[in-house]
Amino acid sequence: MDSVTTNTSGFLYRSPELYDSIYRFDSTGIRLTKMCHELLVRNGKTPPDSVLDLGCGTAYKLAHLNEAGYDCTGVDYLEGMVSYARGEYPDMRFEVGDVRDVRVGRKFDVITCLGWVIENVHSCADIAKVMDTFAVHANPGALLVLGTHNPIGDLAALGAKSDFSIEREDFQATGDASFTVDRRRQILTRHLNWSLPGGATEEEVTRYRLFFPMELEHYLTSCGFGDVEMYDNIDLVPSDLAGSMLYATAIYQG
Ligand SMILES: C[S@@+](CC[C@H](N)C(=O)[O-])C[C@H]1O[C@@H](n2cnc3c(N)ncnc32)[C@H](O)[C@@H]1O
């Protein structure tokens, strides 16, 4: 579990309500939520199809699909995220689990893994386990929607979020992020310096595995997913993948 625990110890992960105050109502977060829904519709996945979201976090994206009538289940590594999500969305199912080995015990029509989740899994052996998790939970014809940073378009992560601001009545903080790249290991490191109430500071260092398009396609096809499509933008416009993010869809063929 080493590669994950180092990535989930930052103070935002310890405080899901603060995490939510940054992302849930952010215009990019809302557009990403809509993009995910659009990908389901484009691929013929309509309510009440079932959705499994791996690494759901506070589950605000999954909640949008739930509201649209999909049958939604979320899994996250952190108990704090899961108990927060349960409190916010009591009509959805949640489990604590690691995307490398969680087994929910049923299959789904859609599997989503969005928003810097798979990047927390660093070794090739562990990535193969994540692919197994996708395959084990997929009905024949299931749609996988995967989002990850796109190093072929933005190796230095210039397009990644670097300014953080929390403006709540009870809590204010700002954060500045910079990035370094370990090319040999395909690891992007985010150095996020927080200015917290009372003059406190905290440095959050997070390591993310980088996935290149052909490599990702190889992982997906190796475990039974095909018809892989990739986009580098939230508007899902076909492009040369020069953008900062990579959104991939694939169909489970067994
Ligand atoms: C940046 S958040 C994204 C949450 C959500 N998917 C979204 O897009 O809003 C990343 C989430 O991945 C979870 N995570 C990290 N490693 C994980 C793992 N190995 N298994 C399951 N969840 C993991 C973290 O706990 C965190 O909630």
Image (cartoon, grey):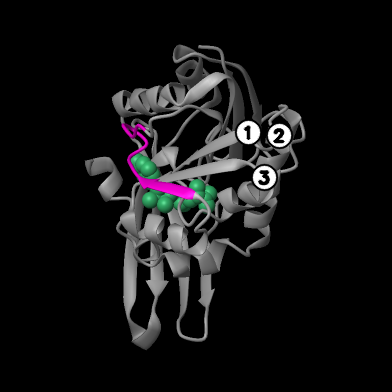
Are there few (<14), some (14-19), or many (20+) residues within 10 Å of tag 2?
some
What's the residue type where badge 3 is placed? Gly
Q: Are marks 3 and 2 in contact (CB under 8 Å)?
A: no
**Helix or strand or loop: what does disc 3 sit on?**
loop
| Above or below, 74 relative to 123 | below
Give the tally of numbered discs: 3
Q: CA distance from mark 1 to mark 2?
A: 6 Å
- Please indicate, yes or no, whether residue 104 appears anywhere in the rendered image: yes
Q: Are marks 1 and 2 in contact (CB under 8 Å)?
A: yes
Q: Percent from the top left, x then y, of residue 252?
A: 55, 18
Left or right, residue 48 beside residue 41: left
Most common secondary structure along the magenta stretch: loop
For marks 3 and 1 on the same chain, the one whose residue lies earlier in the sequence: 1
Which residue has dot 3 on it? 69
What's the residue type where badge 2 is placed? Thr
- Region in magenta: 93-103
Determine the residue located farthest toward the left in the rendered image. Answer: 2
**Helix or strand or loop: what does disc 1 sit on?**
loop
Are there few (<14), some (14-19), or many (20+) residues within 10 Å of tag 3?
some
Which residue has dot 2 on it? 46
Q: Percent from the top left, x then y, of residue 64?
A: 64, 52
Q: Percent from the top left, x then y, of residue 155?
A: 51, 39
| Above or below, 1 relative to 21 | above
Q: Which quarter of the rendering shows the N terminus?
A: top left
Left or right, residue 110 beside residue 77: right
Q: CA distance from mark 3 to mark 2?
A: 8 Å
For marks 3 and 2 on the same chain, the one whose residue lies earlier in the sequence: 2
Q: Residue 236 has which mark?
A: none
- Please indicate, yes or no, whether residue 180 appears anywhere in the rendered image: no
Which residue has dot 1 on it? 49
Q: Is residue 101 magenta?
A: yes
What's the residue type where badge 1 is placed? Asp
